[in-house]
Image: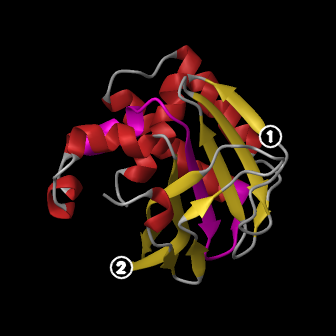
Amino acid sequence: MATASSLPGVQVEFIEFPATITPPAGSVKSYFLGGAGERGLVIDGNFIKFTAIGVYLEDKALPLLASNWKGKSEDELSKSLQFFRDIITGPYEKLIRGSKILPLSGEEYVKKVSENCVGHLKSVGSYDEEEAKAIEEMIQAFKGHHFKPGSSVFYKQSPHGTLTISFSEDATLPEDEGVVIKNKAASMAVLETMIGHL
């Protein structure tokens, strides 16, 4: 069985996602890379890559996932909806890093993220006034931000569903906790919409 420290890092375009990361300020937690890929839009018939996404899981996720999925092949795991559901709903922290491949304004970026989240929440019947408020808080968090290539947005999801959004000029996890959104359904929707296509 692989350990978190033995898993390789991944490069998406010019963006490097290391195999493991440790938050700043003397945290004892560390996270391993669960997967990475790119996001973009089809413009005039061409797929344009805008963002590279890396999904990190708290170290304690590995034994929890292994207990349910030991012995399954990579192909079986990649095709299993339940495996991805276990990653998304597991009782451990998740950390998503979205690093920009092309320059984007905060408003441009969050417009697509919020549209995806609202679409998902409505499709599963979990979109009401509280979720609408949480999505609006997320939109407000991005106002005034301008992302150059290589800059990053970090989304940290607690096991209880609190979402923390922070910003960095590079790939460094910021010490500032950022904006905290306390809505489990909206928090899960962010991870659900990003992990669904990696």
From the viewer's perspective, is 168 left or right of 131? right
Q: Position of residue 140 (x, y in %)?
A: 74, 39
- Outermost residue on the top side: it is 129
Residue 170 in percent (x, y) is at 76, 69
Q: Is residue 44 left or right of residue 85?
A: right
Image quarter where the N terminus lies is bottom left
Residue type beneath disc 1: Glu
The residue singled out by tag 1 in the image is 177
Check the image and report above or below for 66 versus 36.
above
> Dot 1 lies on which element?
loop
Inspect the image, locate mark 2, and give the three-letter code of the amino acid beneath it: Gly
Determine the image quadrant of residue 120: top left
Q: From where the camera sits, is residue 54 visible?
A: yes
Please provide the residue range marked out in magenta. Answer: 83-106
Q: Which residue is mark 2?
A: 45
Residue 169 placement (x, y as % from top left): 80, 66
